[in-house]
Amino acid sequence: MSNIFYAPGKQRAAKVNALFAAIARRYDWLNDLQSFGLHRRWKRRVAELAAAGTGARALDLCCGTGDIAFALARRGAETTGLDASPQMLEVAAARHFKSPISNLKFIQGDAQDIPFPDNSFDIVTVGYGLRNLTSWEGGLDEMFRVARPGARLIALDFGRPANVLWRKIYFTHLKISVPLIGWLFCGNAQAYTYILESLKNYPAQLAVAEKMRQLKLANVRIIGLLGGGMAINYGEKPR
Ligand SMILES: C[S@@+](CC[C@H](N)C(=O)[O-])C[C@H]1O[C@@H](n2cnc3c(N)ncnc32)[C@H](O)[C@@H]1O
């Protein structure tokens, strides 16, 4: 049976919103469990690559509960975290309230229709977001549009390991262990079967790099993590 939370096409936005509304409160905790805490390291890597510094303007799309946005802001960038889900943003706001940081704000919005003019940001990041959009290519086009010449565009997401054996093992983990953990600790297995479902419909790191090249980004590269099971795509908007 195809996952109720994932169905290609325009209706996906409502399904994805329902999914994140359902899991928002436990999202951070489950991320830690399911990735053995490694997602924190990968997000730090994104912030390092972004070379965020004082004075830089950064936009983190699909910011969720704010991990990457916080990391960019702590490095000094004037950071905006944008997400479609009020429930995920509520968690981000609660974290912000606990650890206030003046150069960080969160807004609700659509990553496919970013409410900022062209050439606005020095850094545009997205973590585990492109895969959820109705059109990941449209998301990258928007990232490109709001990036200033010379800006860094960075996308972190699940990947497709090139090694066939590792891919099988990894996809089995996503198919069985990840929903099992979701069921045990969140009472919601279905929300977590969507990771594999969405990944089946998302061409991952190689296609994102190809699209970055089509956009004529400079220094396009893929930073493979976990044997390609995760990946960071990096590129710079030409000056
Ligand atoms: C898997 S979470 C990632 C959260 C965070 N970036 C992280 O790495 O922990 C995906 C996020 O994308 C958001 N999202 C999905 N579609 C979106 C859209 N069209 N515009 C903005 N945010 C969206 C969801 O609400 C959710 O918070």
Image (tube, rainbow, N blue to C red):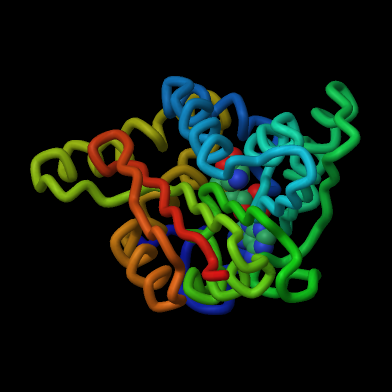
Residue 27 drawn at (x, y percent): 61, 34
Residue situated in front as seen by the camera: 222 or 3:
222
**Residue at coordinates 23% horizontally, 37% vertically from top-left?**
227
Residue 170 drawn at (x, y percent): 24, 38
**Residue at coordinates 54% horizontally, 35% vertically from top-left?**
48
Q: Quadrant of the N terminus?
A: bottom left
Residue 136 drawn at (x, y percent): 49, 69
Residue 80 drawn at (x, y percent): 78, 50
- Name above or below for residue 99 compared with residue 55: above
- Name above or below for residue 24 compared with residue 125: above
Residue situated in front as seen by the camera: 129 or 15:
129
- Name above or below for residue 192 compared with residue 74: below
**Residue at coordinates 59% horizontally, 52% vertically from top-left?**
125
Q: Quadrant of the C terminus?
A: bottom right
| 214 with respect to 134 (left or right) | left
Residue situated in front as seen by the camera: 86 or 67:
67
**Residue at coordinates 78% horizontally, 37% vertically from top-left?**
92
- The single residue placed furthest to the front in the displayed view is 239
Q: Would you say residue 80 is visible in this rendering?
A: yes
Question: What is the quadrant of residue 153 in the picture?
Answer: bottom right
Q: Would you say residue 17 is visible in this rendering?
A: no
